[in-house]
Image (tube, rainbow, N blue to C red):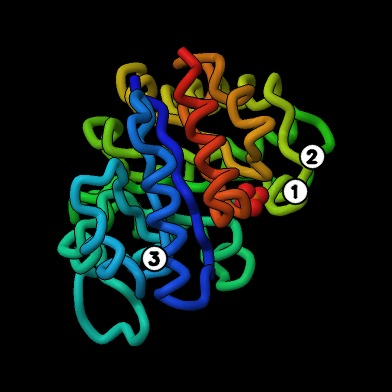
Amino acid sequence: MKKIIIANWKMNPQSAKEAERLFRAVAQGIRGVKNVDVIIAPPFVYLESLNAISYKLQVHFGAQDCFWEDRGAYTGEISPVTLKTLGVRYVIVGHSERRAHLGETDEMINKKIKAALKAGLIPVVCIGERERNHLEDTLLFLKGQLKKDFDGIKPSAAKKIIVAYEPIWAIGTGKAENSDDAQKIAVYIKRVLQELLNAKAALAIRIIYGGSVSAKNAASFVKGGVRGMEGLLVGGASLQADEFVKIVRSVALQK
Ligand code: 13P
């Protein structure tokens, strides 16, 4: 299956002009790359203008969040249905920065996953522990998050869902997870999903890794095929076109 690399630009860059420049540089750099799906998740306000210049380019779009209702009196929120009309295919849900700064709970995230699926978007569900002491504790914590986030999700929706494992201690710190533990965690997440849904559904859900991904370490996370991470969620490094292009190209070389 194709690997997936999502660029989470977070609250960057600060102008549409810069966003366009970055987007063009990335699109140019990944020309001709096969077997990797590249998704750019810019701030909402750039989605329309970037989509307008994406014709014939090998990129898809993602949003960084959505609301759980389709329409109505929810000041400041963005409907998943609106995102769909803007050409968005993916939506990041439950990013740890939203959990931490905006008080998003697993219950809210669960509603967002359901709303995204209903609107025909692919939710990228973020989970991850704050600190790492023992791997066993991390696994239990992740299980707890998955249980709540996937409550009431039907196995038939599985192939439309991505789970992003992003340990909070690795985000923006330059200290990425080691690839062996990342692989163990990918296998464990699949096992939990098998319990929560079923074996077929667990196999269909792609697990990706995020947290200080760089051109140096990117390939190490995806080398395990379906038994490892099947893609990456990239923050800081996705704002430097050269570095991000190197990440995409190094992953494209993996089987
Ligand atoms: P960094 O790649 O900057 O560590 O951020 C990861 C992340 O939060 C992507 O969603």
Q: Nearer the viewer, residue 251 or 98?
A: 251
Is 13 left or right of 157, judged from the image as shown? right
Residue at x 76% of width, y 46% of height: 174
Q: Is residue 31 above or below residue 130?
A: above
Asked whether the viewer can see residue 108, the reply is no
Earlier sequence position, callout 1 versus callout 3: 3
Above or below residue 81? Residue 197 is: above
Q: Position of residue 247 (x, y in %)?
A: 55, 35
The residues tagged by marks 1 and 3 sit, at their Cα atoms, a distance apart of 31 Å
Q: Which residue is mark 1?
A: 169
Please provide percent x and percent y for residue 9. 51, 59
| Disc 2 + disc 1, Cβ < 8 Å | yes
In the drawing, what numbered circle is on residue 20? 3
Circle 2 packing at 10 Å, graded few (<14), some (14-19), many (20+), is some
Residues 6 and 180: in front is: 6
Residue 56 vs residue 126, the one in the foreground: 56
Q: Which residue is more in the foreground, 152 or 128?
A: 128
What residue sits 50% from the left and 40% below the top?
245
Dot 3 beta carbon under 8 Å from ligand 1: no
Give the amino acid at mark 2. Arg
Sort mark 1 into few (<14), some (14-19) or many (20+) by Cα contacts within 10 Å.
some
In which quarter of the view is residue 65 placed?
bottom left
Dot 2: element? loop
**Marks 2 and 3, Cα distance to the nearest angstrom?**
38 Å
Per the rendering, the mark at residue 132 is 2
N-terminal-most mark, 2 or 3: 3
Q: In which quarter of the view is residue 221 placed? A: top right
For the residue carrying disc 3, how many other residues have a C-alpha within 10 Å: few (<14), some (14-19), or many (20+)? some
Secondary structure of residue under mark 1: helix
- Seen at 81% across and 31% down, the residue is 134
